[in-house]
Amino acid sequence: MKTTIHGPILITGAAGQVGAVGRTVTGLLLERGLPVRALVRREDERAAALRAAGAEVVVGDLLEPADVYRVVLGCRRVYFGMSVSASYLEATVTMAAVAREVGVEALVNMSQMTVSQMNIQNTTPSPQQRQHWLSEQTLAWSGLPVVTIRPTVFLEGFFLPVTGPSVRDRGRIELPFGEGKTNPVAAADVARVIAAVLADPKPHLGRIYELTGPRSQDMNGVAREYSEALNREVTYADITSDDWARQLKKAGLPEYLTKHLVTMAELNRAGRYDRLADGVARVTGQPPISIREFVSHHADKFGGLQTTNTKI
Ligand SMILES: NC(=O)c1ccc[n+]([C@@H]2O[C@H](COP(=O)([O-])OP(=O)(O)OC[C@H]3O[C@@H](n4cnc5c(N)ncnc54)[C@H](OP(=O)(O)O)[C@@H]3O)[C@@H](O)[C@H]2O)c1
C-alpha cells in the first residue's frame, strides 16, 4: 500500500561534505518516488545535482530562525543533521522551536552513539559529543515526535579520508586507537535507515537506533579486512595521540574538529567504541556492510587493488 505524504520531506545538510548522509538520504527517497525538499547552504554544483535528481532545492542557514521556518513550512517529516560545528546545539534548538510552531509528524535527529554512554556525571571532552547529548535532551523536552539516530564512527566520513592516504602510500593504517576494538558503520547504511524511517515514520516514533557495522574488532583485525579487500598486506601502526593531534593541526583542521577527533581516538583506545548494535538490520531488513566490502568498493581511494597474487 502506498503511503500518502502531505508535503515534501525536508532533508537538511543535503549538499553533503564529510559523510554526506543528507545527500544519500535525498537520493534514496527520490528513488522511492517520494517528494524531497533539500536544504543547502549555497547554490553550487552539488545543489544543481540535487535539483537534476528531482529534489526541490532550497537555500538557507540552519542558524537563521526565519530561514528554518521558511524551509520547514509545508513539510510534515524532517531529517535534521549538519556538519560537525560549534553551533550544533543552537541549530538543534532553532529546528525544535520551528518544528513545534509548524507542527511536524516526525523529526529524525542525527546524533552519535557515544551519547548512549553519557549522563550528567559522565560526558566526554568532545564538544561535539556534548552538543549531541544536550541536543537529545532538548528534543526530549520539546515533546516533538522524534526518532533518534545514533551511529558509531563512519567509514566514509572517517576511515576513508583518514586512513586512505597512508594505506595508499605506506600500506599502513596509522591511528592512536591502541588495542581498542571498533566497529565502524557505512554512512550509506546510516542513510538507508533514515530513508526507511522517513518513508514510514509512525512505527519508529520515540525510538533510538544505535548503528554499527557487523563486527567489533581491534585495529589488527581491521587491517586484515583491508588486506583481504586490496589483495596486499596492510598493517596497523599505533601512533601517539599527541602525534596525531599535531598531524591534524598541520592539515589545517579547525580546533573544534581536532578536539572532537582526538577525544574519539582516546575513547576508541579505552574500548568505548567496542559496540555491536543491530539498528541497520532491524530497520532496513539488510545487514550492514563490512569493512572489507567497503574498502573493496572504494579500492581506488586506498591505492587500488593488487591484481597479482601475493601472500597476505
Ligand atoms: N563522521 C562520523 O564518523 C560521524 C559518526 C557519527 C555521527 N556523526 C554525525 O553526523 C553528522 C554529520 O553528518 P554528515 O557527515 O552526513 O554531514 P556533512 O556531510 O559533513 O554535512 C552536511 C551539510 O551540513 C551543511 N551545513 C553546515 N552548517 C550549516 C548551516 N549553518 N546551515 C545549513 N547547512 C549547514 C554543510 O553545508 P556545506 O557543505 O555547504 O558547508 C554540509 O554539506 C554530525 O551530526 C556528526 O556528529 C558523524
Image: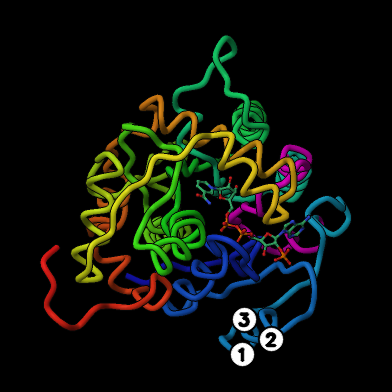
The image's colouring method is rainbow
How far is disc 1 from disc 3 in space, using C-alphas? 5 Å
Q: Is the residue indicated by label 1 positioned so its CB lies within 8 Å of ligand 1?
A: no
Packing grade of label 1 (10 A; few <14, some 14-19, many >=20) is few
Whether pointer 1 and pointer 2 mark residues with C-beta atoms closer than 8 Å, the reply is yes
Identity of the residue furthest to the front in this view: 170
Ligand 1 is in which quadrant of the figure? bottom right
Residue 141 placement (x, y as % from top left): 65, 26
Q: Residue at x 25, y 58 (%)?
A: 290
Residue 33 placement (x, y as % from top left): 46, 79
Disc 2: which residue? 48
Disc 1: which residue? 52
Residue 289 visible to the viewer: no
Identify which residue, 165 or 289, lies in the foreground: 165
Packing grade of label 3 (10 A; few <14, some 14-19, many >=20) is many
Q: Residue at x 44, y 58 (%)?
A: 163
Identify which residue, 135 or 160, lies in the foreground: 160
Residue 29 placement (x, y as % from top left): 47, 72
Checking the image for residue 50, the label placed there is 3
Whether pointer 2 and pointer 3 mark residues with C-beta atoms closer than 8 Å, the reply is yes
Residue 233 visible to the viewer: yes
Q: Residue at x 11, y 78 (%)?
A: 309
Whether pointer 1 and pointer 3 mark residues with C-beta atoms closer than 8 Å, the reply is yes
Q: Tell me where the magenta segment starts and ends, as one range.
A: 69-92
Packing grade of label 2 (10 A; few <14, some 14-19, many >=20) is some
Q: Residue at x 57, y 36 (%)?
A: 262
Does the magenta segment cover residue 289? Answer: no
Disc 1 marks a residue whose amino acid type is Ala
Disc 2 marks a residue whose amino acid type is Ala
| 193 with respect to 307 (left or right) | right
Checking the image for residue 123, the label placed there is none
The relative height of residue 178 versus residue 173 in the rendered view (above or below) is above
